[in-house]
Amino acid sequence: ELVELRDRVDVFIRDEVIPYENDPRQEYHGPTDGLRLELVEKARTAGLLTPNGPTEYGGGGLDYRSMAVVFEAAGYSTLGPLALNIQAPDEGNTHLLNVVATDAQKERWLRPLVEAKIRSVFAMTEPDGGAGSDPSLMKTTAKQDGDEYVITGRKWLITGAPGAAFNIVMARTEDEKGNDLGATMFLADMDEPGIELV
């Protein structure tokens, strides 16, 4: 079954995706949303959309071994992961939300992410000596204010930020005395007051 699925992905990438590699709808920050949606619709029609997503939200429900095989076949084209809706950071965010999100959060963010109706971002990297691949250098902080957290910081080079629907922001949480409690991930809509794309 896995070999058959791999072969289906391989044919799909070669026949449907590779012809788009020179499409002019690729800009400084990657393919436009119009191009993404066109490719996604082709994958949906082929029954290959979001193979890593949970089946209850329309994904393929693949295990890790199967994902590795399918992802390798999709990666034959730089646009393959985008077409199958397994590109970073959406692939990782799909997995994260499936594992830790509440049912309400899954309905609000995971379902449309698996359906490829929205995109997401993961905001960890920072400028000026802040976190790159090492979250221990993170300068962005989150301080509790009643039932909410106030996040203060600046993120940098966040893949896919323009046009994304929601953001998973990494920040150092602090207690009332300013003691560092470690890194925490926060879910926030991209149009949340205070989030500004520059």
Image (cartoon, rainbow, N blue to C red):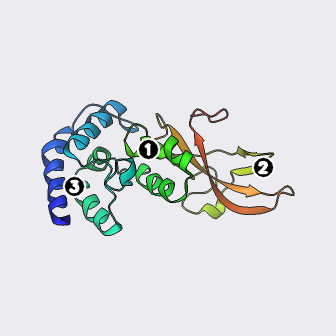
Q: Amino acid at mark 2?
A: Gln
Identify the residue under disc 3. Answer: 76
In the displayed structure, would residue 136 be above or below residue 146? below
Mark 2: secondary structure: strand
Quarter in which the N terminus is drawn: bottom left
Q: Nearer the viewer, mark 1 or mark 2?
A: 1
In the displayed structure, would residue 100 be above or below residue 18? below
Identify the residue under disc 2. Answer: 144
Q: Nearer the viewer, residue 40 or 109?
A: 109
Q: Nearer the viewer, residue 135 or 10?
A: 10
Q: Nearer the viewer, mark 3 or mark 2?
A: 2
Q: Position of residue 145 (x, y in %)?
A: 80, 45
Residue at the spot 33% in from the left edge and 50% down from the top edge: 50
User: Which corner quadrant of the image does residue 172 belong to?
Assistant: bottom right
Image mark for residue 111: 1
Mark 1 surroundings: few (<14), some (14-19) or many (≥20) residues within 10 A: many
Q: Residue furthest bottom?
A: 65
Q: Is residue 182 left or right of residue 30?
A: right
- Between marks 1 and 2, how big is the CA–CA gap? 29 Å
Mark 3 surroundings: few (<14), some (14-19) or many (≥20) residues within 10 A: some
Q: Amino acid at mark 3?
A: Tyr
Q: Position of residue 143 (x, y in %)?
A: 77, 50
Q: Is residue 141 left or right of residue 55?
A: right
Q: Nearer the viewer, mark 1 or mark 3?
A: 1
